[in-house]
Amino acid sequence: MPELPEMENYRRLLSEYIINQPITQVVVNREKSLNVPADQFTQELLGLRAIFVERRGKHLIFHMNNGRRLLLHLMLGGLLYYGSDEDRPDRSTQVEITFGQHTLFFIGLRLGYLHLLTAKEVEEALKPLGPELIDRRMSKERFIELLKGRRGALKSLLVNQHVIAGIGNCYADEIAFEAGLLPSAKIQELSAEAVGRLYDAAVKVLTEALEHGGYMEAPFMEGDAVTGGYDEMCNVYDREGESCVRCSGVVNKVELTGRKAFFCPSCQHEQ
């Protein structure tokens, strides 16, 4: 599932290629991915331009020049591809929006969605999201306050979008590894030092993932050499059975509150 670094990578690329390009065609292959009838969706978008692309957590918000918004959440299996009809991906698409001469293909929106909303409706939809750990308003002190009174497993907290926005399975495991903490470590039992270490680990991992285009390897467009660059940098995620890069241990995989979790039992601990 695309997480904060993947969606920020998309935001940066979209900001470079689609801004102020008129929408010349809209194709809807799956109406359930929308919140309005396909005809209405098409009619409202034709001729509009995206003037700004914003990201909030795992969501993208396309600001249109008439004040309307497109709210995108790719969920599990979703991805974007930008190109011409000649290099369109060999995948079924749920929505296609042509900006000028090139098309943005929305792929894998079986669970995800692309909703046409007002600015106020977007604000209401995103209101439940927690803060982001790489937001300039976040600090170690605020993070420590955020965790006060919280209970449960570390991984469950990191992926809870109402507490912290933008982190999913991959980066929760990578952050826990960087901090030397088990995904199952109890939040209420962490020392102040361990919480501080966790914050530093989160900032480091998310920043590095942003710089390297996230971990999802599917290219955004032909010639894209950035997207997915972080995949080979993952230390534990999807590395079951491999040797730990930090010690002599072996990466394990377990089920933790319904999610898979990858970790090294030799160098990750409860504190």
Image (cartoon, grey):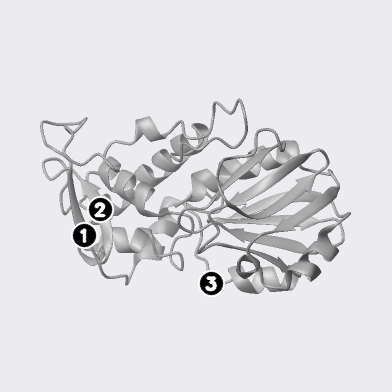
* Residues tagged 1 and 2 counted as in contact (Cβ below 8 A): yes
Query: Mark 1, residues whose alpha carbon is within 10 Å: few (<14), some, or many (≥20)?
Result: few
**Residue displayed at 72% across by 73% down:** 36
Residue 44: image quadrant is bottom right
Q: Residue 128 has which mark?
A: 3
Q: Earlier in the sequence, mark 3 or mark 1?
A: 3
The answer to whether residue 185 is visible is: no
- Residue 151: x and y in percent read 27, 70
Query: Mark 3, residues whose alpha carbon is within 10 Å: few (<14), some, or many (≥20)?
Result: few
- Residue 234: x and y in percent read 33, 36
Q: Which residue is mark 2?
A: 261
* 231 versus 107 height, above or below: above
Q: Earlier in the sequence, mark 3 or mark 2?
A: 3
- Residue 116: x and y in percent read 72, 66
The CA span between labels 1 and 2 is 6 Å
Q: Amino acid at mark 3?
A: Pro
The answer to whether residue 82 is visible is: yes
Q: Amino acid at mark 1?
A: Glu
